[in-house]
Amino acid sequence: MKLSNPVLRSILCCAYLALASCTNPPKQHDAMNSFIDRMVASRHYNKAELNTLFQAVEIKDDIIKKISSPAEGMPWYKYRKIFMTEARINAGVKFWQDNTQALSKAEQQYGVPAQIIVAILGVETFYGQKTGNYRVIDALSTLAFAYPPRSQFFSSELENFLVLCKKEHLDPLNPTGSYAGAMGMPQFMPSSFLSYAIDFNHDDRADIWHTPDDAIASIGNYLAEHHWQKNQAIAVPITAQNDAYKTKLSKDLKPELRIAELESLNLTTSKALPLDTEVKLLSFEQPQGNELWAGLNNFYVITRYNHSPLYAMAVFQLSESILNKKGSFP
């Protein structure tokens, strides 16, 4: 039946939403109960305690809306404007000045430049000022039990969250983070926290929410464990003579082209690199056409933190601006 009448369409739409609101909660309840049963069977948690805990959990509709339209879906020239601001650059310089000792120590220990660590904190949470207002357990439960496209991933992260709360002696109802459950200054997911979080100030707790030292070292450790190459380039601009390069563009982010292959496509890098250097050919949308970049291994490593070339380029360019601005200070 063709719904040509707007009023009829509106009525049917409201009826569908009402039906969904009636049928979804039982499904969410079943998913929650199944999760609790798994935690009892595999992790030996107390079922009564988990039932009590999850009675306090809230499933939030606005989380579903937000995860369905992430910022990474916008064109580069709009995405870039979010992060490449004087306020964020200046705040990055200030954060660096305030945490010089921890950043220098982390750079020496992990081989990751201080400006990269600072820029990641800048992009993620404005240097710890905007860490998110959702309870982590609400965010993860909403996405685990009410967002089927990624329920398996978020169920795993919810499990890891409960594990880290027990390990760190945290009340699961207290930690806050983003709508996706990313936590603290570096916005670690629970699995990343368990694998990479560092107690850098040796107070027997990896506090990525309130302790810059721990957040700084945790980012350095994360990038080092994903094979950051010390003192190596991250990305260099490319000039194209024609459109032949388009056949080499792909969504995969791992470097797979050698410089010699780029030259065969009439592409020229702005900085001379060894012919056997492996790069990823990247195209970023600008209002008057696309700009091309060669992403090297370290660019790929940044995308392990967030699997988006837009994110990695924002981190890279913000890091360069912060470094330059800091260098201009007396």
Image: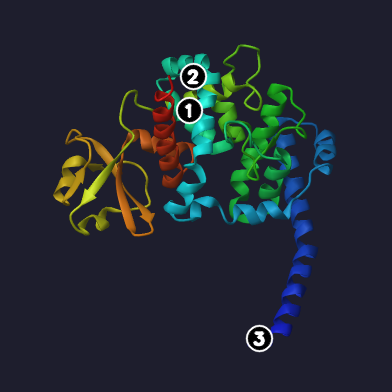
Residue 241 sits in quarter? bottom left
Of pointers 3 and 1, the one earlier in the residue sequence: 3
User: Mark 3 — residue?
Assistant: 3
Give the number of the disc on residue 13: none
Furthest residue in direction top, as rendered: 202
Where in the figure is residue 62, as x and y percent of width and height?
Answer: 70, 54
How far is disc 3 from disc 2 in space, using C-alphas? 61 Å
- Judge left or right: residue 198 versus residue 19: left
Where in the figure is residue 59, as x and y percent of width and height?
Answer: 75, 50
- Disc tally is 3
Evaluate if marks 2 and 1 touch, with contact meaning CB atoms under 8 Å apart.
Answer: yes
User: Mark 2 — residue?
Assistant: 103
How far is disc 3 from disc 1 in space, using C-alphas? 54 Å
Amino acid type of the residue tagged 1 in the rendering: Ile
Give the structural element (helix, strand or loop) at label 1: helix
Amino acid type of the residue tagged 2 in the rendering: Leu
Query: Going 19% across and 35% down the picture, which residue do you hit?
Result: 272
Amino acid type of the residue tagged 3 in the rendering: Leu
User: Mark 1 — residue?
Assistant: 117
Asked if residue 297 shows in the view, the reply is: yes
Quarter placement of the N terminus? bottom right
Of pointers 3 and 2, the one earlier in the residue sequence: 3
Query: Going 67% across and 36% down the picture, which residue do you hit?
Result: 159
